[in-house]
Image (tube, grey):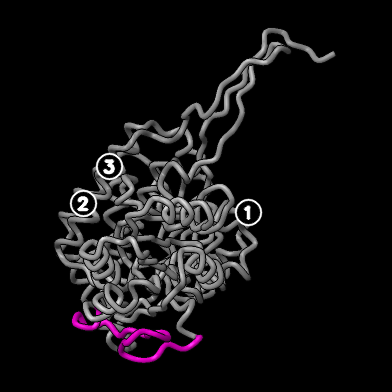
């Protein structure tokens, strides 16, 4: 019998057809069955945690062999605490209200029509992601909750971990009597599978890329399927002259060093000129003591001098750029030029610059006096996220189950005819 993992077109055709059939059944699945599937997946994942950790050990060895950075290895690593976090996300998503069938708007017309706009599943979602194996569970759970079938294509680095997590998700589906093809994981590292997903207009309704600039650029260039854009997280923090010093120091250390490999990690620090030599110097010293390499602009003393290439760089590492700005408007101008519309933050006690920052910037997430590490669907109360959408169509910011729905109009009359 031919191994279909060696025949990518036939493999992807079969996966796509199965997903389309599963989506039709999921669109009518009850909230109770979807809840049961997610709880069953959580229980199966904990019961199989030994298998997951063994699979992850293989991926870590592969990552070390490839020379992945420490930040990338951190994204790849699983332990029991992180598995518990995945399980908590599954349970949180399970307990959320079912987003399908919500009445989004309802009104009557003088012509005798009663009109309702209700939430419906998107259909089949394709998710292409890199080294974070937890995305397998997050994306699978969110798509299921929203009544969508999903086709997952994980990164080569997380190949074994993703398969082990996916196996637990399938157990949950089976327990609830839902089609196992509702959550499918492409069983090959062959990059031809990605190209097949991007052009599978008959089988996939929307693509969600979750990864670095290279992956998102590839998807944006080659996709024939609509895309939820998730661009790189070039996250800025502006420290205003009115900032509380202790608060600013704590926030910035957390925003940069808690986990450097996530898209909400701070990458550029903008410091008001009036506090550059005082609070700014203290913040830079704090960062350097923690092992952060500070690429400092004119008027600041850091690890190395910043160059033009540092503005607009997503390091995903223990590095940060720092620059002196004249005021909030100068900070806004810098962010508009070099940002990625992902997440940006202002630290200030004065309400006026905060209001201006919030009004004049159009990032998907704007924060005030908070660590940018909170730029995460789980922290927003969504249970998890499939990504941070930085585009402006349909969904923006953390994409949870509610954002993975579309809508349709239900129109009723009582013999209404149009003259």
Residue 286 can be seen in this image: yes
Measuring from the top left, give residue 249's x and y in whole percent.
24, 68
Q: Are marks 3 and 1 in contact (CB under 8 Å)?
A: no
Measuring from the top left, give residue 247's x and y in whole percent.
23, 61
Q: Are marks 3 and 2 in contact (CB under 8 Å)?
A: yes
**Over which residues does the magenta segment extend?**
287-308
Q: Which residue is mark 3?
A: 175
The extreme bottom residue here reads: 304
> What's the mark number on residue 202?
1
Measuring from the top left, give residue 288's x and y in whole percent.
24, 83
- Horizontally, residue 227 falls left or right of residue 2, namely right
Q: Are marks 2 and 1 in contact (CB under 8 Å)?
A: no
Judging depth in this view, the residue of 46 and 257 nearest the camera is: 257
The extreme front residue here reads: 274
Residue 204 can be seen in this image: no
Identify the residue at horizontal 27%, vertical 42% (top origin).
175
């Amino acid at each position: 019998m031919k191994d279909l993992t060696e025949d990518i077109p036939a493999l992807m055709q079969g996966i796509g057809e199965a997903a389309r059939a599963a989506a039709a059944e999921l669109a009518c699945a009850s909230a109770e069955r979807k809840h049961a599937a997610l709880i069953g997946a959580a229980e199966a994942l904990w019961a199989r945690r030994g298998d997951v950790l063994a699979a992850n050990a293989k991926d870590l060895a592969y990552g070390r062999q490839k020379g992945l950075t420490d930040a990338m290895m951190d994204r790849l690593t699983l332990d029991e605490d992180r598995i518990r976090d995945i399980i908590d996300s599954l349970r949180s998503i399970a307990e959320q209200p079912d987003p399908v069938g919500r009445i989004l708007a309802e009104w009557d017309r003088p012509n005798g029509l009663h009109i309702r706009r209700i939430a419906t599943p998107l259909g089949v979602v394709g998710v292409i992601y890199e080294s974070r194996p937890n995305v397998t569970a997050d994306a699978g759970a969110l798509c299921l909750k929203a009544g969508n079938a999903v086709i997952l294509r994980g990164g080569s680095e997380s190949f074994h971990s993703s398969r082990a997590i996916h196996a637990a998700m399938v157990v949950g589906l089976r327990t609830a009597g839902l089609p196992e093809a509702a959550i499918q994981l492409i069983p090959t590292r062959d990059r031809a599978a990605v190209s097949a997903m991007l052009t599978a207009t008959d089988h996939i309704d929307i693509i969600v890329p979750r990864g670095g600039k290279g992956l998102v650029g590839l998807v944006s260039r080659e996709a024939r399927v609509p895309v939820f854009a998730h661009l790189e997280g070039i996250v800025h923090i502006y420290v205003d002259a009115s900032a509380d010093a202790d608060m600013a120091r704590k926030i910035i250390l957390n925003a940069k060093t808690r986990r450097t490999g996530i898209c909400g990690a701070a990458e550029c620090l903008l410091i008001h000129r009036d506090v550059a030599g005082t609070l700014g110097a203290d913040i830079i010293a704090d960062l350097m003591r923690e092992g952060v390499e500070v690429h400092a602009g004119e008027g600041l003393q850091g690890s190395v001098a910043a160059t033009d290439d540092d503005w607009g760089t997503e390091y995903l590492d223990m590095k940060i750029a720092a620059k002196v700005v004249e005021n909030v408007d100068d900070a806004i101008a810098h962010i508009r030029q070099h940002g990625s519309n992902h997440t940006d933050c202002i630290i200030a006690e004065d309400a006026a610059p905060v209001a201006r920052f919030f009004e004049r910037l159009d990032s998907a997430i704007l924060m005030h006096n908070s660590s940018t590490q909170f730029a995460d669907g789980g922290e927003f109360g969504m249970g998890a996220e499939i990504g941070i959408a930085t585009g402006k169509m349909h969904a923006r910011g953390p994409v949870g189950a509610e954002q993975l729905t579309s809508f349709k109009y239900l129109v009723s009359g009582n013999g209404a005819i149009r003259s």
